[in-house]
């Protein structure tokens, strides 16, 4: 990785980091290189968790880990005690960067207590994981896993992005966490293409009084809830961006219409940690013409729609999404299982012009009275009423229906009750798709990328049912 270090040193003379000194960043990276090299003297291929709160220090440590060919795990400094315990049990790191109170000294004498057989297994695993980048993904289950990537898989994703947008350089405005693939890839695109990078965490951006200027050449990545807030706060500023990439969770129709009314250069995306971010994207010019699909396939990937027996489906036929890409992950830590073909849990279809439309997730499908209901469709209809701030739809056990469509929602204000929402969606959804139960809450358990935690949703339902244990009818409200 000497050429990577050479690139970093060359870039230290350029003002490519907006709001941060490029020379300081280069020196910071070299300091981490020294620290990681010292660690490698003590342990063959130490496992290093990066948990720096400061995004520039995090990225410097990330580059140092790649340059020293270490096994690096991207960590969230805001993980709670239980999450950290889960990660520590899984990874058993030799060094944690960024959290002094959790830092594990790689000189720890307890290593000597490992039995020879276990030590050999650990060494073999370490050799297999050399040069690897482990990126956390919680999915919708809430359980933390690490998708195994390499510098090459991430670089392949960057190349696909460049080819799709037919550009040679990417300037990124990053307000997403850099430990997540959506934030990390913004850094990768800028670094590998000699572009500029501005990092303003979202919580600071919402309070910004002096918005950064001259963003006409920049890409910015957002999740739907962030787009909604920024459209309310700074619609004209947002409209100045070259492209606003939108992903992380399904957007609702009224949000897309609002963005279109403000002439936002929106690019809906579909991708995941396992594919090093997007493999399908809608170009802004198509969005502004009224297209609400997820877009077309990027050059570095192939996407197919199949039935449960893996038979290829025709356009407009909904099925399981299968992805083949040279940016695909190598498996979930600690099991390396390289494959470029990924069978997802997502359902969708292609139209006649090869635009991908996402319907929902197969595992989240609700079967109620023998009918299939996809939460995304119901959520979109409820959000489109403008009566709720947020909503999540799940299936809950029901003695009569098998599963009952249940909406957990946050009303726009205290004057809005479920009867008003029910009336508003009566002619928007088939009767069997309309929620039978409604639960009003103050907040929904979403992560920073907008993904809902289904395990916590189930807990919310259990708590509300315990509080309302009396018999309830088919249009009950747990409010």
Image: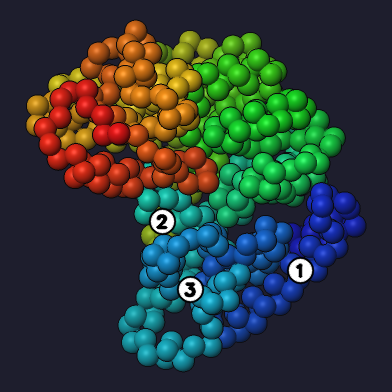
Question: Residue 121: where, in percent of width, then height?
Answer: 37, 75
Nearest to the observer: residue 18 or residue 431: 431
Q: Is residue 150 above or below residue 437?
A: below
Q: Which residue is mark 1?
A: 28
Q: Which residue is mark 2?
A: 144
Can the viewer see residue 6?
no
Question: Residue 330: where, in percent of width, then height?
Answer: 46, 52
Dots 3, 2 in contact, CB < 8 A: no
**Which residue appears farthest toward the top when viewing the image?**
427
Can the viewer see residue 17?
yes
**Which residue appears farthest toward the right when viewing the image?**
13
**Quarter the C terminus occupies:** top left
Q: Quadrant of residue 42?
A: bottom right
Dots 2, 1 in contact, CB < 8 A: no
Q: Quadrant of residue 474?
A: top left
Residue at figure coordinates x 48%, y 61% from the top left: 79
Nearest to the observer: residue 40 or residue 185: 185
Q: Quadrant of residue 240?
A: top right
Q: Looking at the image, what colour scheme do you see?
A: rainbow
Nearest to the observer: residue 64 or residue 478: 478
State which tag comes first along the sequence, 2 or 1.
1
Disc 1 packing (10 Å; few <14; some 14–19; many ≥20): some
Q: Is residue 193 above or below residue 55?
A: above
Q: How far apart, in angstroms, are the residues tagged by discs 3 and 2?
A: 15 Å
Disc 2 packing (10 Å; few <14; some 14–19; many ≥20): some
**Quarter the N terminus occupies:** bottom right
Q: How far apart, in angstroms, are the residues tagged by discs 3 and 1?
A: 22 Å
Question: Residue 204: where, in percent of width, then height?
Answer: 68, 48
Q: Which mark is residue 93?
A: 3
């Amino acid at each position: 990785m000497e050429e990577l270090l050479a690139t970093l040193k060359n870039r230290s003379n350029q003002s490519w980091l907006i709001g941060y000194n490029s020379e300081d960043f280069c020196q910071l990276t070299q300091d981490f290189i020294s620290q990681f090299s010292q660690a490698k003297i003590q342990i063959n291929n130490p496992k290093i968790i990066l948990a720096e709160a400061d995004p520039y220090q995090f990225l410097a440590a990330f580059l140092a880990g790649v340059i020293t060919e270490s096994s690096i795990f991207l960590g969230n400094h805001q993980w709670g005690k239980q999450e950290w315990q889960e990660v520590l049990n899984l990874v058993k790191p030799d060094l944690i960067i960024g959290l002094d109170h959790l830092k594990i000294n790689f000189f720890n004498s307890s290593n000597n207590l490992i039995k020879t057989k276990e030590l050999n297994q650990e060494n073999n695993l370490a050799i297999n994981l050399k040069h690897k980048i482990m990126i956390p993904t919680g999915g919708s289950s809430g359980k933390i896993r690490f998708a195994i990537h390499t510098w090459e898989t991430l670089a392949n994703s960057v190349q696909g992005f460049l080819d799709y947008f037919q550009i040679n350089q990417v300037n990124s405005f990053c307000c997403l966490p850099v430990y997540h693939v959506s934030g990390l890839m913004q850094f990768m695109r800028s670094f590998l293409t000699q572009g500029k990078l501005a990092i303003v965490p979202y919580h600071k951006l919402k309070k910004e009084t002096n918005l950064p200027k001259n963003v006409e050449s920049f890409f910015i990545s957002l999740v739907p809830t962030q787009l909604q807030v920024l459209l309310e706060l700074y619609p004209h500023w947002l409209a100045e961006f070259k492209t606003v990439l939108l992903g992380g969770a399904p957007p609702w129709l009224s949000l897309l219409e609002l963005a279109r009314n403000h002439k936002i250069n929106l690019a809906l995306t579909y991708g995941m940690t396992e594919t090093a971010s997007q493999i399908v994207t809608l170009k802004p010019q198509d969005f502004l013409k009224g297209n609400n699909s997820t877009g077309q396939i990027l050059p570095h990937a192939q996407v197919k729609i199949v039935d449960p027996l893996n038979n290829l489906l025709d356009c407009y036929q909904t099925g399981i999404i299968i992805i083949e890409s040279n940016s695909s992950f190598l498996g979930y830590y600690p099991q390396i299982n390289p494959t470029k073909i990924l069978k997802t849990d997502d359902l969708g279809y292609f139209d006649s012009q090869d635009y991908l439309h996402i319907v929902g997730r197969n595992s989240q499908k609700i079967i109620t009275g023998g009918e299939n209901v996809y939460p995304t469709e119901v959520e979109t209809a409820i959000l489109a009423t403008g009566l709720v701030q947020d909503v999540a739809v799940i299936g809950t056990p029901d003695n009569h229906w098998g599963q009952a469509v249940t909406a957990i929602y946050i009303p726009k204000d205290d004057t809005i009750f479920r009867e008003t929402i029910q009336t508003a969606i009566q002619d928007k959804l088939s009767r069997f798709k309309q929620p039978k139960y409604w639960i009003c809450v103050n907040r929904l358990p979403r992560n920073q990328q907008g993904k809902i935690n289904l395990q916590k949703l189930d807990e919310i339902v259990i708590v509300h049912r315990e509080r309302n244990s009396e018999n309830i009818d088919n249009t009950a409200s747990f409010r």
